[in-house]
Amino acid sequence: MSGVNEIRSSFLDFFARNGHEIVSSGPLVPRNDPTLMFTNAGMVQFKNVFTGLETRPYDRAVTSQKCVRAGGKHNDLDNVGYTARHHTFFEMLGNFSFGDYFKERAIELAWTLVTKEFGLPAHRLLVTVFAEDDDAFDLWKKIAGLPDERIIRIATSDNFWAMGETGPCGPCSEIFFDHGEDIPGGPPGSPDEDGDRFIEIWNLVFMQFEQVTKDERVSLPRPSIDTGMGLERIAAVLQGVHNNYDIDLFRALIGASEDATGVVAEGPHLASHRVIADHLRATSFLIADGVLPSNEGRGYVLRRIMRRAMRHAHLLGARDPLLYRLVPTLVREMGRAFPELARAEALVTETLKLEESRFRRTLSRGLGLLEEATAGMGEGATLDGSTAFKLYDTYGFPLDLTEDALRPRGIAVDTDAFKEAMARQKAEARAAWAGSGEAATETVWFGLREDLGATEFLGYDAMKAEGVV
Ligand code: ATP
Ligand code: MG
Ligand code: MG
Ligand code: MG
């Protein structure tokens, strides 16, 4: 059985042997790209190479790219703990051709890697192609010898990739692995395709057009290739497990979480351990790439991920900061492949510890309030917006944390009312301060609130109660 680290290496080596330059992962915060919250695919660091704005000394590359999909266009946060195949942080393995080889060679390389190098049985693989892409259909038939019914034509945007409204675009072809009929889920394109029986392992994008304007599309003179394979998903297949969270790397992280909490990862506790392991990775890698928890933008996404993990630690009975204690295991497992993680170990540990100690002060009280407010509620009920807002404002519960906490019970949150309560409070607070004529204080007050967040609000109230302010 190969571990994640060996699988990553064999992917990189295979493409290096086939004339690709091994390029290191780009950072999670994309350089010079304000349009993107986090790097969410392997092609991000090559965007300008594909458009021709930038040239590199190579025209074939291979990477294992750190990705976070927890905000913006791709957001898998709500999938974690529910599907077998989604993480907030994951590694995307990819090979790239910048105007060099195209569809035929890309399919050949992919098929050789998957069936020869990795030795997957062809009868458990199936592929999708864009409905109009006859070339891809014929190539799969010729190269892989797949029967027609296992080359599925898909007409939706799932099989047509575009960089944006304009720019490079083209059809894609995805490779799926059939984990077996014991697992619920249908093949791609079927009504129950969102199940986890047929898992998408690799997406090949054939960049062959340029969208010039909304209505005009031209063929690219030098078409390109961009592919993405989830390392954790292929590891699951190669290690003979169905769920990504059962691969060696996650077993190590979950083992550390079991040791630290004394709670075995089974039954109702399993999902919590999985969420903790997932969120620990996302959190640590984001901090290592310079993101710090805050109340806006990227920092707020990080804070939300951290707090969600902390609630799960609380569910497992942890009453002291827990996540920071798992960092050494993560560094042991991944620090060699990502030296920046090892270098940032102290910063990651301290940041986690501080955020955990802060949130601990309000977490259990907030959960108490939530329990009271929802006592007697059954499936299909809705929590009122003002309680959700109080949890946010006084107890530092991001809205999605409240939603996450109620989801297993089938209780929704009135998010419109939440937003109204938020807007009302902002307006009232501003009006009150304007009325007092203390403009300077207002600036300090709102400034502090942005910096410190709702948790510190309670601290302020507490100080007031104690007569400090
Ligand atoms: P899915 O349909 O399963 O959500 P996707 O089509 O959104 O996957 P792509 O955008 O095509 O994924 O990304 C390329 C590859 O990266 C996928 O084939 C998959 O192997 C992997 N991948 C995508 N999202 C995740 C995730 N959240 N966690 C782990 N691996 C992922
Ligand atoms: Mg997806
Ligand atoms: Mg997909
Ligand atoms: Mg895909």
Image (cartoon, rainbow, N blue to C red):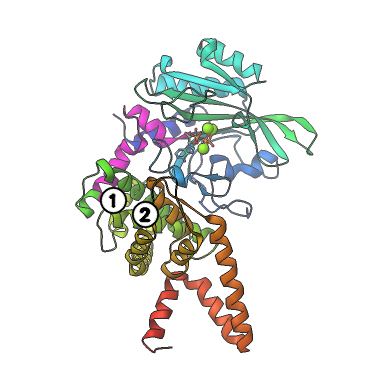
Residue 97, image quadrant: top right
* Magenta segment includes 256: yes
Q: Which is more foreground, mark 1 or mark 2?
A: 2
Amino acid type for the residue under numbered disc 1: Thr
- Residue 281 seen in this snapshot: yes
- Image: 433 above or below 7: below
Image x and y of residue 162, in percent: 66, 36
**Which type of secondary structure does the marked residue at label 2 adopt?**
helix
- Image: 47 above or below 237: below
- Respond yes or no on whether mark 2 lies under 8 Å from ligand 1: no
Q: Earlier in the sequence, mark 1 or mark 2?
A: 2
Amino acid type for the residue under numbered disc 2: Ala
Image x and y of residue 104, in percent: 60, 19
Image x and y of residue 288, in percent: 43, 57
Looking at the picture, tell me which residue is in the foreground, 391 or 197.
391
Q: Is residue 18 left or right of residue 47?
A: left
* Residue highlighted by disc 1: 329
* Residue highlighted by disc 2: 309
- The range drawn in magenta is 229-257
Looking at the picture, tell me which residue is in the foreground, 31 or 468.
468
